[in-house]
Amino acid sequence: MLPVSLFGPLRPAAALVVVAATSLAAAPVLAAQSFVIQDIRIEGVQRTDPGTVFAALPFRIGDTYTDDKGSAALRALFATGLFKDVRIEIEGQVAVVVVEERAIIANIAFVGLKEFDKEPLTKSLRDAGIGEGLPFDRALIDRAEQEIKRQYLSRSLYGAEVVTTVTPIERNRVNVTFTMTEGEAARISDIRIAGASVMSESTLLELFELNPSGWFSWYSKSDRYSRTKLNSDLEKLRAYYFNRGYLEFAIESTQVTISPDKQTISIAISIKEGQPYTVTSVRLEGDFLGKEDEFRSLVLLRPGQPYRGDAVTETGRRFTDRMGLYGYAFARVESRPEIDRATGQVVVVFAAEPQRRVYVRRVDMAGNTRTRDEVIRREFRQLESAWYDGGLIKLSKERVDRLGYFKEIDIETSEVAGAPDQVDLVVTLTEKPTGNLAIGAGYSNAEKLTFSASIKQDNAFGSGKSLGLEVNTGRSNRTLVVSTVDPYWTVDGVSLALDAFYRTSRPINFLGDSYDLKTPGASARFGIPFSEYDTVFLGLGWERTELGTSVGLPLAWLNYRALYGSTTDAFATTLGWARDGRDSLLAPSTGRYQRLFFEWSFAGEVRYLKTNLQYQEYWSLPARLTLGVNAELGLGRGLGGKPFPVFKNFYGGGLGTVRVFEQGSLGVIDPTGSYIGGAKRFNANAELYFPVPGTGNDRSLRIFAFYDMGNVWREHEKATTASLRASAGLGLSWISPVGPLKLSWGTPLQVQRNDRIQRFQFQIGTAF
């Protein structure tokens, strides 16, 4: 390649003086006599822009060249990371900069990679400076190789080997190949706890997330050793004793032994239990803002009870949270036990230091690459330029979490430099896919295989609005629904929901004749928030009913057509109220949900009133159990002296009502064999959730036992306990990537001769 000069190509000089070698740490070079630079020439560049080299040089044409400037030029060029070797040669009054470029990485490949995904590994290597198109650096490659080995160790793959192969190719490029020999993961063969006398070893081992290999280890991977998990388990062990009064409990040693073949691991833990302590009193010290009585009411410890570490921690948290309500963002509360070993008693002292009161200068968002800032900010109750309020910040986080758009939400408080009375809130978010796919299927002799599906995008284009499409392909019932919801139709938080639907129904008919019911319609519903948890709904809708041929038409539908005609319109207004206090929408463990709904058809050929009441509650029980109950009552009544229209009937049976019974099969059966539902419905459900062994506190996968009871009745039929249907069974609940999945298998407990049984049922996208 021709040398690059500010004056063009130069003729080779007869004399050559080397003033710098290839390393800054090389031996002293020959000193060059100072001179005025007439030209600067660059040699050796292939891919690098010569302008990059000229920009790094500390001298220009017309400057006086010195050894100090030459050394500075070498340091600047090496600092770019683009060159493996650099030297400066002097030809008369011309400075010749000779460079040797680093090889460029053309391709990175992984051979034998199974434990990790390729994409995240490639990204992490690129962040470390190793990637396609980047300069090759042997030192970085060696460090990356060691880091990959450490990652394998963190997954108990102690026999894993990583070999790096660098293959030169044309145009000063290289291919880098990481060859992995992963081997088998080391499994925990046993865990022993020595020194336990008050508590049994088996009881203590039940606290651990790590455990020896078992039948479910293939899913939970709980038999893979991890130092982080072991430390977490040791903290659980320590907390277990502290919560029972053993203040001086100590873990004396922890030994982890791996077998010579690196396939099995043994863990030995030595503990000292100490003696239990009883609380005699709780004392408050420091500044409690003159509200000692208010703070004392928050104390969870009581004299005469054993010392409980979790109660001490929770009391301290309550104190700091309460001070946060008064604007003290940096309040400090320390607990100090004063123990008397002779009597086994302890006095718990809480010392408070409120620090200073502050207000929030700014609320910043980070991580919401898809969701617009305004969607998050409108859920915030902590305002900028207002006093810091810990309660409002907590409520803001809960409201953002209820959006369902984010996997993680973290709010950090940072001080403002030079302003001790100001803080900034940094809201860090991790987004998740907001599309939802709900799938349902069932099988029966009458309908054979039925399928229903819905697609919903809850955060369309990051606007917070939702768009939905629902399709049902059952032989007897087919549905097409298009819907959209704007949760902030007004700046005050009034929501607007629009629906357009087209339904056809061909109820099961033992006669096998063809007939159908077509129902097009549309509706609009407004949601008005009255509190942080209460919403009132107002709506207006239109619905048309078109009855097809009379051949095989159920008797109930013939009666309907005789009263109202084959084509009818109904204009209905809706009124509803909902309160949602559950801790989670997908896998609740505590909290309550209530809903009341009225639908009144005030115009058109059909007049009726329809009411629906629902109540849900969840309780967190010991041993990580959760009990959930659900009850629902529906009532319909015809107006104007006419019966309740059959096509507005309630249906029962299947998931969401009474499992084990075929979907929609409960209630009155028309003489033609059609399921027509009823004007009254009641169902009650109970589910007891317990964790899958080996999954720890993970609530995304749970096993449950259920008991369902309910039925559907006609408008003037008396609802009796003897007519109720009941079932019980087991199921599996899994929050899958496409939505919550429920599988259930059960048996009927109260059943009548004509009931249709469907023991196995599943649905994606359901709760009860």
Image (cartoon, helix red, strand yellow):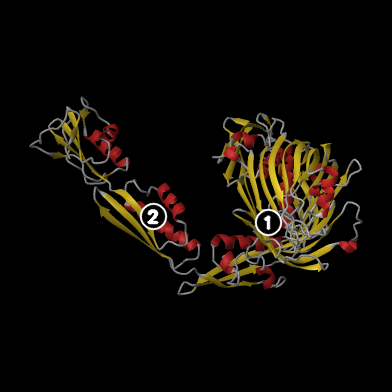
Quadrant in the picture for residue 756: bottom right
Position of 210 with respect to 48 (left or right) is right
Q: Position of residue 199 (x, y in %)?
A: 71, 70
Q: Secondary structure at mark 2?
A: helix
Q: Would you name the residue on which mark 2 appears?
A: 143
Position of 653 with respect to 7 (left or right) is right
Query: With respect to residue 709, does 374 lie above or below?
Result: above
Q: Nearer the viewer, residue 220 or 74?
A: 220
Q: Secondary structure at mark 1?
A: loop
Q: CA distance from mark 1 to mark 2?
A: 62 Å
Q: Residues within 10 Å of mark 1 (few under 14, many from 20)?
A: some
Question: Is any part of residue 426 visible from this angle?
Answer: yes
**Image quadrant in which the C terminus is located:** bottom right
Q: Would you name the residue on which mark 1 appears?
A: 475
Give the residue at the far left of this rendering: 14
Q: Are discs 1 and 2 less than 8 Å apart at CB? A: no
Question: Is any part of residue 278 visible from this angle?
Answer: no
Quadrant in the picture for residue 268: bottom right
Q: Position of residue 60 (x, y in %)?
A: 24, 28
Please report the residue visible at 83 percent of the width from the left and 63 percent of the height from the top: 725
Q: What amino acid is labelled 1 in the image?
A: Arg
